[in-house]
């Protein structure tokens, strides 16, 4: 009979983990009233199997026989033909996409930028595009996403609030790659394999290139930023590796993220002056700020507002909120360490700024993004504003004190999410709102599990969301047991987790 592996708590504390017959918790977790979970990554026993490719040019193992039998295998030319990068037909598009068909972005053909479709069918897009290129290898598919904007968005949509961000994001990544191709290619390829597994389930976890990711991480550890080109390479490499870790292990993501931001901290004022670098700079700053908001730490970089109308692929319209959240993190950290009254006053001043804050709707917004994308960014901004106010409330009110106000903020967060989803359809999701929903779940008992599934496009189970769910369970067990201390102290004492925006 197979033995049951130790739970996460006993594994972390190096304690003997014993289970009574027919019980769901080990004896140590029962005695400490802790959640008993086994969410850490399981090491595969034995040697790593040798990957075998089937069919002409390999990679037929990605699809079933029926799907591949009617597809003509062919090699990928150096430059994709127009047919290989064409958009989906109008019958496959949603009404919003048809309405916005006149709006166009750009695709790469023959090394030149040419007009092309920008709004793509989210769920069918990757399947249709990949089946079209069935006869080529994963290496060639990786190269295809660099030349086809359509395929790039279908592959990387989890990193964007909508397809309107794909053009600039791809352009920036290509420019970064030109700065340091040998430095970045392994990282980009490793991320590609992780995406086709976690996002699309088009291959198995065994095909995720962990070795390339590990090699890139070693390079990051020994890398020194000596000039602006080095800074661009580092700010592209580090957050990509952090995201790779979230998808595959979810253990050291924040350490990787903050290390890479610290490497470019001195260069940030110069980097922030270039709008073309926004797609790789704003998102990691947003992630780090979200992490520090929960753990009462100080973000590495305070975002500099160059243009109040700037919107980001991950932060959306929250760019002007970022400096305010940074100030909140600093004051929260100082209050935690000293408890001096002056920090209370600072936090109250920040609270007034957040109450007065509203996202900026720039004149170019409606010309650059679809109605669906603008609605998503608006809902996200409202949720983060409520989450920031909820955070401040819990800084001053222990659990059991003014819980009704905390519940009101949490209810507002959930209501904004549901309002957005109902307006767009049952299958719609709202990415990059995990932090507000996590805070809401800590205040609203028995938040529907379905709500969590509407935050991510991943088809593979999200390790990160599983860990957040374990923390929510832990907090409610403590609250039910009569805990009446600081919510943030409780989070530090609970299971390990990674905060994602």
Image (cartoon, rainbow, N blue to C red):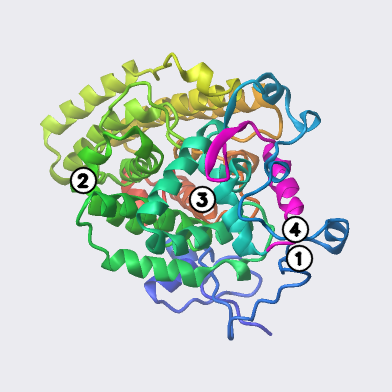
Residue 374 at x, y = what percent? 53, 22
User: Can you tell which of label 4 and label 3 is closer to the viewer?
Assistant: 4
The mark nearer the N terminus, 4 or 1, is 1
Q: From mark 3 to mark 2, how far is it between C-alphas?
A: 41 Å
Residue at the spot 31% in from the left edge and 33% down from the top edge: 397
Q: Is 19 above or below relative to 260? A: below
Which marked residue is nearer to the observer: mark 3 or mark 2? 2
Left or right placement of residue 277 versus residue 456 in this view: left
Report the residue marked by disc 4.
Answer: 134
Q: Earlier in the sequence, mark 4 or mark 3?
A: 4
Task: Give yes or no for contact between labels 4 and 3 (Cβ–Cβ under 8 Å).
Answer: no
Disc 4 element: loop
Query: Between marks 2 and 1, how big is the CA–CA gap?
Result: 45 Å
* Residue that mark 3 sits on: 473
Residue 381 in the image: state x and y as whole percent: 44, 26
Q: Which residue is mark 1?
A: 60
Q: Quadrant of residue 428?
A: top right
Q: Earlier in the sequence, mark 3 or mark 2?
A: 2
Please tell me in which quadrant of the rendered image residue 456 appears: top right
Position of the N terminus by quadrant = bottom right
Element at badge 3?
A: helix
Query: What number is the disc on residue 430?
Result: none
What segment is highlighted magenta in the picture?
Answer: 107-136
Q: Position of residue 258 (x, y in %)?
A: 30, 53
As drawn, 407 above or below 215:
above
Residue tagged 2: 267
* 130 inside magenta stretch: yes
């Amino acid at each position: 009979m197979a033995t049951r592996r130790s739970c996460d708590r006993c594994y972390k504390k190096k304690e003997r983990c014993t289970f009574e017959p027919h019980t769901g918790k080990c004896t140590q977790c029962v005695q400490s009233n802790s959640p008993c979970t086994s969410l850490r990554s399981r090491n595969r026993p034995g040697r790593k199997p040798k990957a075998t490719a089937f069919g002409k040019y390999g990679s037929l193992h990605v699809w079933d026989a029926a799907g591949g039998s009617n597809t003509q295998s062919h090699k990928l030319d150096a430059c994709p033909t127009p047919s290989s990068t064409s958009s989906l037909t109008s019958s496959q598009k949603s009404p919003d996409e048809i309405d916005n068909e006149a709006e166009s972005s750009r695709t790469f053909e023959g090394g030149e930028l040419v007009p092309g479709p920008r709004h793509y069918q989210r769920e069918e897009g990757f399947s249709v595009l990949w089946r079209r290129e069935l006869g080529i290898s994963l290496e060639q598919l990786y190269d295809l996403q660099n030349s086809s904007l359509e395929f790039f968005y279908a592959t990387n949509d989890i990193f964007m609030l909508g397809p309107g961000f794909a053009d600039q994001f791809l352009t920036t990544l290509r420019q970064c790659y030109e700065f340091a191709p040998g430095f970045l290619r392994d990282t980009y390829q490793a991320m590609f394999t992780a995406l086709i597994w976690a996002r699309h389930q088009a291959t198995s976890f065994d095909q995720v290139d962990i070795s390339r990711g590990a090699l890139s991480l070693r390079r990051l550890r020994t890398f020194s930023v000596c000039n602006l080109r080095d800074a661009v390479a580092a700010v592209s490499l580090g957050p990509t590796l952090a995201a790779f870790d979230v998808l595959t292990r979810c253990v050291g993501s924040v350490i990787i993220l903050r290390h890479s931001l610290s490497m470019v901290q001195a260069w940030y004022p110069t980097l922030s002056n270039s709008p073309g670098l926004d797609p790789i700079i704003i998102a990691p700053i947003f992630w780090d700020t979200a992490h520090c908001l929960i753990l009462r730490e100080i973000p590495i970089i305070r975002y500099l507002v160059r243009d109040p109308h700037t919107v980001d692929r991950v932060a959306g319209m929250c760019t002007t909120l970022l400096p305010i959240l940074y100030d909140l993190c600093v004051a929260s950290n100082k209050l935690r360490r000293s408890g001096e009254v002056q920090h209370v006053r600072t936090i109250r001043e920040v609270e007034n700024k957040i109450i007065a804050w509203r996202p900026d709707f720039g004149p170019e917004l409606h010309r650059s993004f679809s109605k669906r994308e603008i609605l998503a960014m608006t809902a996200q901004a409202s949720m983060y504003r409520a989450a920031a106010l909820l955070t401040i409330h819990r800084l001053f009110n222990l659990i059991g004190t003014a819980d009704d106000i905390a519940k009101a903020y949490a209810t507002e967060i959930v209501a904004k999410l549901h309002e957005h989803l109902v307006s767009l359809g049952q299958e719609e999701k709202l990415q990059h709102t995990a932090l507000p929903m996590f805070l809401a779940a800590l205040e609203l008992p028995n938040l529907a599990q379905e709500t969590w599934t509407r935050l991510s496009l991943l088809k593979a189970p999200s390790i990160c969301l599983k860990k957040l769910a374990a923390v929510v369970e832990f907090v409610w067990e403590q609250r039910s047991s009569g805990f009446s201390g600081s919510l943030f102290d409780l989070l530090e004492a609970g299971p390990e987790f990674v905060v994602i925006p």
